[in-house]
Structures are given as C-alpha cells and as structure tokens.
Amino acid sequence: MLRLTTDQKVYFTLRLAVAMCFIGHGAFGIITKPIWCNYFALVGIGHDAAYRLMPVVGVVDILMGISMLIYPIRAVAGWLVIWGLVTASMRPLSGEPFAEFIERAGNFGAPFVLLLLQGGFKIPVKQWFSRMDDNVVIKASTLKMVINCLSVFAFLLLLGHGCLNLIEKASLVNQYNSIGFHDPGKTAQIVGVFEIIAAFSLLIRPFKNLLLVFIIWKITSELFYPHYEMFEWIERGGSYGVLLALWFAVKKAPSGFIVFPWKNINKLRIS
C-alpha cells in the first residue's frame, strides 16, 4: 500500500484542490451561468457573445483542472494563479462587494503555494514546462513560507465569506432558508461573526485542533446551495485545499516552529 509523507500530503492536497476549483468553475461555463455576462461586459463583450463564449471558457478551465490531476506542469499552475486572480477581481469590478474577491483567495492561493513547493518562481524557463515532482521534500525555510502563505489565504477566504454573511448576501440567506432556518438573516449574521473570528484566529496562530474544526465546517457548509449543489461544492475546492494543506503543514512543524504570518524568525530550525 502506498504511504504518502506529510510533505506529499500537502502537495497532493493542493493539486486536487486546484483541479476541483477549475473543473467546478468550468462546469458553470458549460452550464452558462447568467451572472457571467456581467464579467464579460467588463471587457466589452455583449450578452449574446458572452453566452457563446462561456462554454469555451468552461472547457478550457476543465482541461486545465484535469491536467493538474494527470500531468501537472508549473506553467499551468502559474496560469491558474493569474486566471484565479482575474476571475475573482471581476466580481468587485462588476459592482459586487469586495468580499467576493477575498472569499475566493483559495482559487489563486492553492496554485500559488503549489508553485512554492516546486521551487518557487525563480526557476529556468524550461522547468516551467516540465512535470512537477511528486516526491516533494519541504525544507525548513520553505515550510515557513508555506505555513505563512496558507495562513494568509485561509484568513482571506474565511474573512470574505464571513463578511458576505454579515451583509446577508441573498444566495446565502436563501441557502439557510432552504435548509429550514426560521430566521435566515439572523443565521447569516451568526455565521458571519463565527467565520470572521475563525479567520483572525488562523492569522494569529493556526492551531491544529481549531483548523480541523474549520475544515469540517467549510466542507459541510458548502454542501447546501439550492442550485447546482455538487458543482458549487467542487468549485470551492481551493478553499478546502488551503485549509487542509495548512493542517498537514502545521502537523509537520515541530513545537515552537509556527510563527505569525507577518513575521520571520530565522533562528528556528527543523532537526
């Protein structure tokens, strides 16, 4: 039976997360999600043309996601960082709350950290088009960067989702109503406060036990969308992946190794 090291668990978790995110996102392109028309309009593409282009974008996203499962290369992961940032940015640019952008930090955060595990960004051009190394060994200095980056991305995605609850985003309120809450607006407020507290707790210090609670919460709470539940859940793979990869990374770190994401302590070493 194949046994993965903790380092490999971080790596494969992020690979799967990236694939889920872009396969789920691509599915909505094929379904032709109406709100996408707002994003195409930002670059001057009209309603009819947007509906013709959505399946094309969807297919490309799905192929990129599948490639990360079958034959992952750094160039694809790099493109997905950029594409994740662009698509997330389109939401506030089209008039949606800024929280919509930061709530999608996992979309670009997962491929970003995946690249850190594969030697970072200062590598020869040829290596960008070579297959990623599955036998990952995370050095002490890299582990610090991984934990710090994952903590920041986890903070952003929880903070963003919490803020969307506090402003009672219609789809979230409808979600709570559909599963039987009598006062979905109040439920959204309570959930929002919980998620914002969770976000800051991870930014201050990502404890393993608390992380496990947040992972279970995120995975289960995303199951209750009224429409296209499975595709919605799959698309948020970046969020689960960032949290789960952070949990594995924290498990690897010895006592006293975890540092605040905004600080750097060079005296710590892994024996």
Image (cartoon, rainbow, N blue to C red):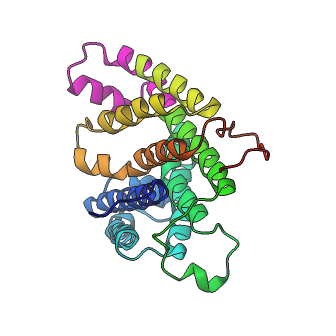
The image quadrant of residue 57 is: bottom left
Whole-percent x, y for residue 146 in the image? 60, 51
Whole-percent x, y for residue 185 in the image? 37, 18
Say above or below: 169 vs 60.
above
Q: Nearer the viewer, residue 99 or 271?
A: 271
* Residue plotted at (61% across, 86% down): 126
Q: Which residues are magenta?
A: 162-189
* 261 with respect to 109 (left or right): right
* 171 with respect to 80 (left or right): left
Q: Is residue 228 visible?
A: no
Q: Is residue 117 magenta?
A: no
Determine the main secondary structure of the stretch shown in magenta: helix
Q: Nearer the viewer, residue 78 or 214?
A: 214
Whole-percent x, y for residue 188 in the image? 39, 21
Whole-percent x, y for residue 42 in the image? 53, 58
Say above or below: 56 vs 159.
below
Q: Is residue 266 visible?
A: yes
* 129 with respect to 33 (left or right): right
